[in-house]
Image (tube, rainbow, N blue to C red):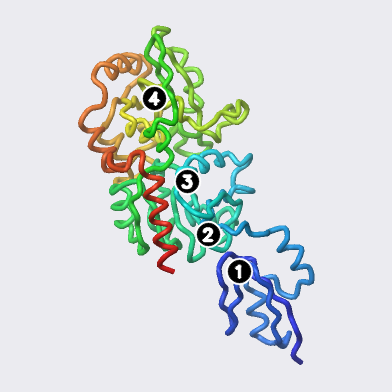
């Protein structure tokens, strides 16, 4: 016997099943036999609410904002304390400035969705599946294998900072479109929206990536940096710029490291975004090899950019803390060398520095116009 069954699509993209097309965030009533295989297949679709009588309540709780372009946090349960929200805000803010009807959302919604986590990470955390109008842009510029093709295969489009990332993804077999747009987070620094603080003595900023509790945890110099920074002589100004997920950073409500990067004369970094950000800003970087090198080379493989930095010794590499202190003076006098300059040019070209938000917005509007 045929029965009237309400079906609500809670996904942000159309779902096609058994001859039906259920549009996102819309309820449709179908006539179907409840004991049929067609009905069983419809009920098996994870993102469909089938036979529910309170779909109106769900729609009110998940009301869309009417944006054409959604900058998606994906953070409600993905990261304790939403530690990445400020980072995503810093990446998406320069893009929104150049877009009509764009804003931040906690989950992907109908329209174009810029998402800042790999498909692998989204699936692992049980977040909303990647849809056909979702676009990948990493939440940082560090490699850490976030960018490899198999981790973003479900995205039809990827925004990347430079040709090194295009090559990295394409060599892995990525089939979607790759758009080189630059690294949007640093636009405010290149465009003079921050004022550099001047200090009597050179400023050394230690900016580690987040710590790891599992094998190869030495990829970060946190938490060792908390004590080691005290060994830097008082003839230098020194500051810690912790990763937003670190416990102390959350306790102190530390912002993203924009001001520290701008102010720094020397940056100490390990295997994360800050090393690329520092180089893009023309800051010499010192690496604490005695903490990080072995684990970076063990965890990553040739082709990974962090692996290349440590394997080839790009930048200033310290064998111990005493050597690191000596390298501060060396780096202050010599500045960035040709190897660092050439490396960061491939990662984040000079011509896109300060223009990345506008370039990314142009790509998004071109995709919208083509639909």
| Depth order, front residue of 192/212 | 192
The residue carrying mark 3 is 97
Q: Secondary structure at mark 4?
A: strand
The residue carrying mark 4 is 268
For residue 24, the mark is 1
Q: Residue at x 67, y 80 (%)?
A: 40
Q: CA distance from mark 2 to mark 4?
A: 40 Å
Query: In the figure, 332 relative to 217: above or below?
Result: above
Q: Residue at x 34, y 31 (%)?
A: 281
Question: Which is more N-terminal, label 1 or label 4?
Answer: 1
Q: Nearer the viewer, mark 4 or mark 3?
A: 3
Question: Which is more N-terminal, label 3 or label 4?
Answer: 3
The residue carrying mark 2 is 68
State if disc 4 and disc 2 touch (CB < 8 Å).
Answer: no
State left or right for residue 364 relative to residue 279.
right
Question: Which is more N-terminal, label 4 or label 2?
Answer: 2
Query: Residue 307: where, in percent of width, then height?
Result: 32, 40
Q: CA distance from mark 4 to mark 1?
A: 47 Å
State if disc 1 and disc 2 touch (CB < 8 Å).
Answer: no
Q: Secondary structure at mark 3?
A: loop
State if disc 3 and disc 2 touch (CB < 8 Å).
Answer: no
């Amino acid at each position: 016997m045929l029965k009237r069954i309400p079906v609500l699509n809670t996904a942000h993209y159309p779902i096609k099943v058994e001859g039906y097309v259920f549009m996102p965030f819309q309820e449709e009533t179908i006539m179907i036999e409840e004991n049929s295989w067609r009905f069983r297949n419809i009920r098996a679709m994870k993102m469909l609410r089938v036979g529910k009588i309170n779909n109106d309540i769900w729609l009110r709780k998940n009301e869309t904002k009417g944006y054409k372009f959604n900058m998606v946090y994906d953070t409600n349960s993905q990261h304790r304390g939403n530690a990445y929200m400020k980072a995503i805000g810093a990446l998406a803010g320069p893009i929104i400035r150049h877009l009509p009807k764009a804003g931040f959302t906690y989950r992907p919604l109908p329209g174009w969705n810029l998402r800042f986590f790999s498909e692998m990470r989204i699936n692992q955390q049980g977040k909303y599946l990647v849809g056909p109008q979702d676009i990948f842009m990493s939440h940082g510029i560090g490699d850490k294998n976030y960018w490899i093709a198999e981790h973003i295969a479900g995205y039809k489009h990827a925004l990347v900072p430079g040709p090194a990332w295009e090559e990295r993804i394409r060599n892995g077999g990525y089939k979607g479109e790759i758009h080189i747009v630059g690294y949007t987070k640093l636009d405010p620094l290149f465009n003079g929206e921050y004022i550099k603080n001047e200090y009597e003595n050179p400023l050394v900023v230690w900016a580690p990536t987040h710590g790891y509790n599992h094998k190869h945890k030495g990829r970060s110099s946190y938490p060792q940096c908390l004590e080691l920074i005290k060994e830097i002589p008082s003839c230098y100004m020194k500051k810690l710029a912790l990763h937003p997920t670190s416990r102390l950073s959350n306790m102190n409500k530390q912002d993203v490291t924009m001001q520290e990067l701008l102010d720094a004369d020397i940056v100490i970094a390990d295997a994360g975004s800050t090393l690329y950000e520092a180089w893009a800003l023309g800051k010499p970087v010192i690496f604490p090899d005695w903490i990080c090198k072995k684990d970076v080379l063990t965890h990553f493989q040739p082709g990974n950019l962090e692996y290349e930095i440590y394997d080839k010794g790009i930048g200033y590499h310290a064998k111990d803390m005493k050597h690191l202190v000596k390298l501060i003076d060396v780096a202050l006098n010599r500045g960035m060398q040709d190897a660092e300059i050439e490396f960061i040019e491939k990662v984040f070209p000079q011509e896109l520095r300060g223009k990345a938000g506008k370039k990314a917005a142009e790509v998004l509007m071109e995709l919208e116009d083509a639909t």
